[in-house]
Image: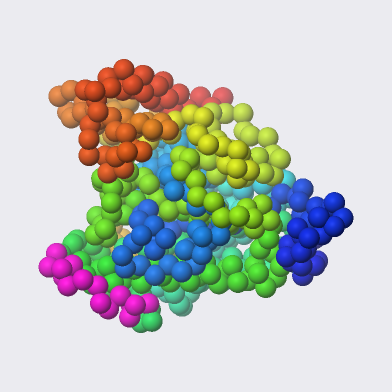
Amino acid sequence: MNHSLSLRQFALFILGPAIALATGSAPAWADQPPNIILCMGDDHGWDETAYNGHPHLKTSVLDEMAATGLRLDRFYSASPVCSPTRGSVISGRHPNRYGTFSAGWSIRPEEIGVAQMLGKAGYACGHFGKWHLGPVKAESPTNPGAMGFEQWLSHDNFFEMNPFLSRNGGRPERFEGESSEIVIDEAIRFIGEAAQRGRSFFAVVWFGSPHEPYSGLDQDLALYDNLPQSYQERTVRLTSMETGLPTQRPLREVLRERYAEITAMDRAIGKLRQFLDKEGLRPNTLLWYCGDNGTPPEGAATVPFRGVKGAVYEGGVRVPGIIEWPAKIRQPRASDVNAVTCDVLPTLCDLAGIPLPSRPLDGISLKPLLDGEMTERPRPICFWNYDARRETQSKLEPYIDPKLQEGTTPLVKKAGGQATRNFSNFRHPTVAERDFAGPRAILGNRYKLVITDRGGKASLKELFDVRADAAEETNLIGVKPAIAEEMEQELRRWQASVLESLTGGDYR
């Protein structure tokens, strides 16, 4: 793709329909794979956008994207917590397949990442912001470079104002400023360099916002000075920006800062879109925004669903999702087809004409959805909070040398007295019955089955018609037992496949 002709390309985008009618020809990029940008908010729940009806938030850029692009009204994170969801984007696979069970569990070096695949197809690949799939230092076998990114300015975990970030695995440096703008500026620099070299680009921007602890610019905080006084009467637990330790604060103050972070992130995305417009790159650039899990407890003032971050109910896994690609998505559309972060790799490979890896994938290509041809998902989505106590209590062999799993980039929130984070992953050579435990769910086009273990008691099984009951209030298990039984059997078969992958079976 020759981006030195970007102004001409932009003119063709504006005039493309008229040219096509007059000459019978298609725009210059009609048969070319798109440039690709993936943006992800950290702990950004489904309702926390104005376009989804939030009563307080200002998200003008995301609102415009939703109004002009493809709005994914039923978009899900593969996990209700961050590291696993990010692994699902990179691999197209459920994170339990490679032992990324929760926050602080690394990916495995043998996983085939979407950047590796797009890089082989000629894309310039860059990562900016939160990584959280292992340390970002140069010697880590799971850093962004090992997963196919030729450039990265990244953090092991989440980050706040004035963050410490590592460039291409080097010593962490402090960057002054609002963190969303910092990582967007780096992505813009990377995209500009790729365009000058005539290369298609794949840029991943994983924000540190709006994860707690919260802070905000005065201009953004001022937008939320008049939140309801009723929020002041409730206190919530979160991290102190001053000490890095747990504290209790009034919900009203916390939400003011959280919402300011979301607005700043929204503005940074707007800066990126303006750059793409200015350079004539926007028409054939696919920009995909989503959250990595549902709203956390300290921010859950307006969540319309059951559960929050960490739960396999809708409040834990349903997130904002928008795809903007002007050359392809010429008319605004809203889709109620179920989609999930595991779908990213299969979709991008399909668009780029790249064969999929020959191992089990849990995502599907959404290209038919982009083409307006998909009205239902052809197979269900499964969720599973794996019970990792076998790994942590059974002295299993570390999958990666623990020294290589030690993080380097500081963050405000302390853990065990440390300002950095280390990672874990273990070899899991055999499968036992107890490995099937942990809260789990299977989501079909209408029904969702949720299974929760209760120690020595029988598991709690709940069946919901999520099309009619988005809040998951009415358990239909006694009314539709045959549907529940069929879904449970399919979920069990899927779990068996995942556990076979966990043993390393896909790498042999």
**In the image shown, does 60 or 32 lie closer to the viewer?**
60
Name which residue lies at 22% across and 35% down: 474
Query: Is residue 226 highlighted in magenta?
Result: yes
Q: Residue at x 69, y 64 (%)?
A: 281
Queried whether the magenta region covers residue 102, the answer comes back as no
Which residue is more in the foreground, 258 or 242?
258
Indicate left or right for 292 with 355 as reference: left
Q: Residue at x 39, y 63 (%)?
A: 50
Left or right of residue 217, residue 31 in this image: right
Q: Nearer the viewer, residue 225 or 51?
A: 51
Image coords of residue 46 (percent x, y) = 37, 53
Q: How many marks?
A: 0
Q: Is residue 108 visible?
A: no
> Is residue 262 depicted above or below 434 in this figure?
below
- Provide residue 115's location: percent of width, then percent of height: 61, 48
Quadrant holding the N terminus: bottom right
In the figure, 460 relative to 67: above or below?
Answer: above
- Foreground residue, 81 or 77? 77
- Segment tinted magenta in the rendering: 220-234
Q: Choose top left, top right, bottom left or bottom right for residue 355.
A: top right
Q: Locate residue 68, reporting x and y percent.
A: 56, 60
Tell whether 204 sits left or right of 103.
Answer: right
